[in-house]
Amino acid sequence: MEMRWGLITAIVTVSVVVGFADESGQRAPYRIHTLFSVECQNYFDWQTVGLMHSFKKSRQPGPITRLLSCTEEEMKNYRGMDLAPTFHVPSWSRHPKTGDWYPAINKPVGVLHWLQHSEDAKNVDWVVILDADMIIRGPIIPWELGAERGRPFAAHYGYLVGCDNILVRLHTKHPELCDKVGGLLAMHIDDLRVLAPLWLSKTEDVRQDTAHWATDITGDVYGKGWISEMYGYSFGAAEAGLKHKINDDLMIYPGYVPREGVEPVLLHYGLPFSIGNWSFTKLDHHEDNIVYDCNRLFPEPPYPREVKMMEPDESKRRGLILSLECMDTLNEGLILRHAENGCPKPKWSKYLSFLKSKTFTELTKPKLLAPGSVHILPDQHEPEEFRGAYPKIHTLFSTECTTYFDWQTVGFMHSFRLSGQPGNITRLLSCTDEDLKKYKGHDLAPTHYVPSMSRHPLTGDWYPAINKPAAVVHWLHHTNIDAEYIVILDADMILRAPITPWEFNAARGRPVSTPYDYLIGCDNDLARLHTRNPEACDKVGGVIIMHIEDLRKFAMYWLLKTQEVRADREHYGKELTGDIYESGWISEMYGYSFGAAELNLRHIINKDILIYPGYVPEPGVAYRVFHYGLEFKVGNWSFDKANWRKTDLINKCWAKFPDPPLPSAVHHTDNDLRQRDLLSIECAQKLNEALFLHHKRRNCPESSQEISSGSRKVGTFEAKQAQGSDDAKETTESEGRFSTLKLWVIALWLISGVGFLVVMLLVFSTRKVRGTTRGKGYRNKRRTSYSNTSFLDTNDRDRYVRNTET
């Protein structure tokens, strides 16, 4: 078995290397060299193993060099010299002149040192520069990406806001040439020779400019100058007169959804990502010696077939498959590395078998770019308007660790998948540590966890609504965001169609929202007390579409103004706030309006985006969102979300809401009222449809008549809408029920006849077997013919009277 394992390892390694050598010959019209920068740490060693393995699998042409930044003392104990072709460069983690501790500067230092001292640099035309925490999926060939001499190719880093403000004017004479790029770089060697010294010097300049490290200037969520090296690159390139060709879909972070029709060639696992209950964060393995710990791998992710079962949406499923491909490639690289280290053959496991399977081989075969498939973004310094290539969108909604928000989340996520809303989505989940230990709904949506402020940490005030602005602030400061526009919604909403900035004319400095006319405090003393610009107070809420840079400036004001209005108990009166309970419950809504007024953010107010079920729709308006915050009725049937506050609809199999009437039951002569009721039915049907699919994904046992009934009703509304004849459907249903009854009668008659024939056969059979044996067999046959039936109890309704969304 040991020999067999060694043979398998050798075959895999040789086949990969042979394929790589075949592709890296002189067929290419120009010579390519790939670089990546690391330090002498276990943390970078396992990343090196993953990158090197993917480099070989992808058949990237040309050689690769690891720029290893280590002090002489570190080199004495370093054991990973054979992990990759290596060029040792001096470590500048501690700056030799200023003493500043900033390891990221080693990247431009290493590139410059390689250019000045490596023989390889003299025999190359094009250079591809990557980071260690990447997995290559296919050949990265500069000229195929569109790179030219004087026009490097790069991936988009939209959060480098310093290219648009005072930072760029301080650090380059050509601010108009500053590009927000990084991660994947491909350029001609002559351009790199000009750029490299400027890259280093500009990195030093920005790093020393501590007066302009603030988040609103740099986009650095920590405000510590950590991304100075990235600005050093952009400002250095501007100084060198280099204008990039920028792409935003060939490099992708695992966990993100790839653009339709695009096959990314690079996975950058710099951010946490998850698949169901499994997750991976590279920072959790900062001191991990997994490269040298025989046969230990990272926790195995789910298998592709499991991903297909857990995610019905094809585009999101593609994103999850990329995530598991990233992790599996890392682990495959570790297996081969352990074999090279002389480790004993690992024990057989289902996971190891999968990594050797045809399925995995097919999944990770090199991805080749189709001619003309590379999408280049338009010039970032063109006027601020949408120019054909739409910006990225990220959708947010805020919840808490309760089953009340969980069923809303299930409905919201189901409608999000059906709506065609572009971009990614994040649930901002506000929980205490104690609640989080007991919480069961982690897999309901992509989630960012936020400390709960329901009980204010300073005042002790109980006000859960403050979690919404607090969560947005936390998300902005703890994630890398590559979206240009953020859409903020509430959990108690159902999406019907996409909500996009280009369709509703959102722009930087000009957010879009929906009218909340009951916020009368914008017109009286309340606004004059809480904002310096009462004339800029907009009565808006519900749906928010805002540019990311506006949100970065605004979010903290939203939180602070919410606290301020909440503390102003003297002005809770209905005549000032419009709050019928005079309890300060809508302080968060005023916090939003007053915070926006402080920054003079005037909204485009659009009344055609959102509708409350139960309201009469405007003729011809295709509303994008249902907001079921208020009770609504159709005939004798009604729905009020507050009645379901304490009912667990998520963890009890097949639990659902009472079915609304069928559309065919709506017989108003008044068309406005008819359309009102049809929209209300659609909203309720979508909630029950979402719950049904949720329970189905949870593998609830399908043994109840009520389950069957529920599954039939899920698709009823859409099917009936498509046919367009309500009366005909009622007739069809009646006939269907009658036909079913006839079938049962016929079946019973047949069973009786067969039973009679069996008895006659037994009576006239041989006398020797007439006695006890016959009777016993007959009785057994009778006993097994019975079956039990079971019924699923419906959830009790515990009504909680609260109506704050008048």
Image (tube, grey):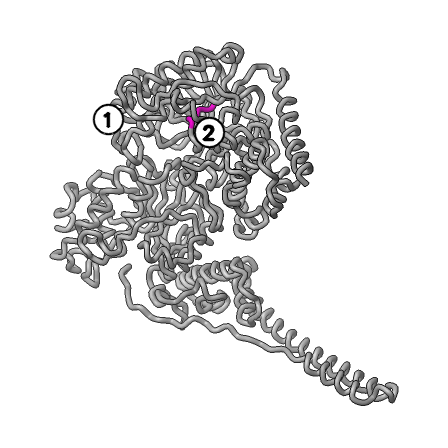
For the record, the magenta segment spans: 36-40
Q: Residue at x 45, y 43 (%)?
A: 280
Number of the label disc, if any, that sits on residue 132: 2
771 shown above or below 579: below
Looking at the rendered structure, which numbered label has been put on residue 432? none
Is 728 above or below relative to 170? below
Based on the picture, tell me whether residue 39 belongs to the magenta stretch.
yes
Could you say which quadrant of the image residue 28 lies in? Answer: top right
Quadrant where the image shows the C terminus? bottom left
Specify the quadrant of the image occupied by residue 676: bottom left
Give the image location of residue 165, x and y in percent: 28, 26
Above-or-below relation of 22 to 731: above
In the rendered image, residue 552 lying in the magenta stretch gets the answer: no
Question: From the viewer's perspective, is the residue at label 1 or at label 2 nearer?
Answer: 2
Dot label at residue 210: 1
Mark found first going from the N terminus, 1 or 2: 2
Q: Is residue 748 visible?
A: yes
Would residue 638 be found to the left or right of residue 48 on screen? left
Choose between 130 and 618: the one closer to the eye.
Answer: 130
Q: The N terminus appears in which quarter of the rendering?
A: top right
| In-front residue for pair 410/667 | 410
Q: Distance between the residues labelled 1 and 2?
A: 28 Å
Identify which amino acid the numbered label 1 is placed on. Answer: Thr
Residue type (three-letter) at the residue carrying disc 2: Ala
